[in-house]
Amino acid sequence: MERGAKDLPRADRRNDAPRLSDDERLAWLRLIRSENVGPVTFRGLIEHFGTAERAIAGLPELAARSGRRIRIAGVNEAEHELAALDRLGGRFLAIREPGYPAWLREIDAPPPLVAIRGDPAVFARPAIAVVGARNASVAGRRMAQILARNLGEAGHVVVSGLARGIDAAAHEAALQSGTIAVFAGGLDRLYPPENAALADRILASGGAHLSEMPLGWEPRARDFPRRNRLVSGIAAGVVVVEAAERSGSLITARLAGEQGRVVFAVPGSPLDPRAAGANRLIKQGAHLVTGVADILDILAPMLEPDAAAANWPDTAPEVSGLGEREDPSERDRDVLIEALGPVPTEIDALIRWTGLPAGTVHVLLLELDLGGRIERHAGQRVSLLD
C-alpha cells in the first residue's frame, strides 16, 4: 500500500530556484487553462517546446494534426484571473518555484500551477491528511479532533478537504497549529457554504487554502476525486477516521496508496456502516490507529530532510533539438493508434511494441491528448477514447 521510508519525498530543495517572471506566469496560466491541456500534457508541452510561450504558439498545429481545433486561453482571460486572485488576497505558485508543496511536486501529474490564499509557510512543514465521513458520528468527530490537535502539537500541518463531518472537525482542531484546506472548485467557490466561517478562521490563524481550479469554477461531482489527489499528495500520510464502503475518503486512501503515501485508518464498530470502509482498509494493510503515536512512530523517519531533488524540467532558454526533429509521419500515427485501445497501457510498453522512437510517441500522445482522443491514467498509462 505504500513505499518504504527511504522512497518518500523529502524536504523542498528548490529554495534557490528562480521565480517565474510576470510574463512567464501569464503564459503558464494561459497554457494550463487552454482546452484539453491537463497537468501531464502541460509538462509534455514544456518539455517539447522549452517554454510556455512557445507551447502556446505551437498548440494550434499540434491539435490540428489530430483533426480538431482547440480553444487557447487568451491574454485578457489570464490577466483577469491573475487580477481577481490578487484582489482575493491570493497568488499562484508554480511547480518550479520555492514554496510549492514538496510532496505534491512528486505525485503523478502534479498541477503545474496552484492558487493559494493564506500563509505559504505552512506548505514547508510536514503535513498529514485527516479525512472521513461527511455524516460522521460524534465519536468519529471527536477522534478526528484529538488526532488533528495532537498532530499539530507534534509540529505537523493537518490537510483536509473542508467538507462536513470529519474534515471540518480536523480543520477546527488544527487551527492553532496550522491547517490546509484543499478546494474542489475555485478559491472563490467554497463548498459547502456552511463552512465559510471555518474557512475564514483557517486563514486568520495562519493556515492556507489551495486549489488547482480556475477562479469562478463551481465544483462538480467529478472534481472531488481530483481534489482528493491533492489532499493526499500534499501529505506524507493519510488518516481515514470514518468512511462508508463507497465514499470519497476511500478514493483519497486509494490515491494515497498509488502516490506512495502511508495510509492509516481508525477502526470502528462492525455494526456502524460509517466504519466499514476504514475497517476494510485495515484488512487490506492500512496501519491501525488508536492514537497519534501510531502515526508519528511510522512517519518520523520518513520526514527527515535529505538531498532529494524535484523532478521537474527547468524552462529552457532554447528549444533543444526541436528545429531538427522531424514531425511524426501518418504511418507513425497509424501505428500508435493501432497499438492503443480502451485498456490503459503503459507508455513504455507502447514504445517497445511499436518500435517508434520515444520522442515520436510522446509527440503523438500530445497531439492525441489535445485532440481529446486519449485519456491519461495513473502510472504513465494511456487509453484510446474513440
Image (tube, rainbow, N blue to C red):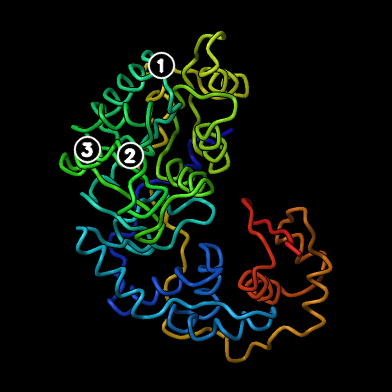
Q: Is residue 233 above or below residue 267?
A: below
Give the class, few, some or many, for how many residues have Cα within 10 Å of label 1's Cα (few <14, many ≥20).
some
Residue type (three-letter) at the residue carrying disc 2: Pro
The N terminus, quarter of image: top right
Q: Quadrant of residue 58?
A: bottom right
The CA span between labels 2 and 3 is 26 Å
Q: Quadrant of the C terminus?
A: bottom right
- Horizontal side of residue 94 vs 42, given as left or right: left
Q: Can you identify the residue that label 3 sits on?
A: 197
Which label number is shown at residue 261? none
Q: Nearer the viewer, residue 9 or 179?
A: 179
SS at mark 1 in the image: loop
* Residue 63 in the image: above or below residue 300: below
Q: Farthest bottom residue? A: 323
Q: Residue at x 30, y 22 (%)?
A: 145
Identify which residue, 208 or 192, lies in the foreground: 192
> In the image, which is nearer the foreground, mark 1 or mark 2?
1
- Compared to residue 337, the image places residue 267 above or below, namely above
Q: Nearer the viewer's eye, disc 2 or disc 3?
A: 3
Expressed as whole percent of the image width and height from the top left, the position of residue 56 reads 48, 81
Q: Mark 3 or mark 2, which is nearer the start of the sequence?
A: 2
| Tag 1: amino acid | Ser
Question: Which residue is under mark 2?
Answer: 126
Residue 137, labelled with which disc? Answer: 1
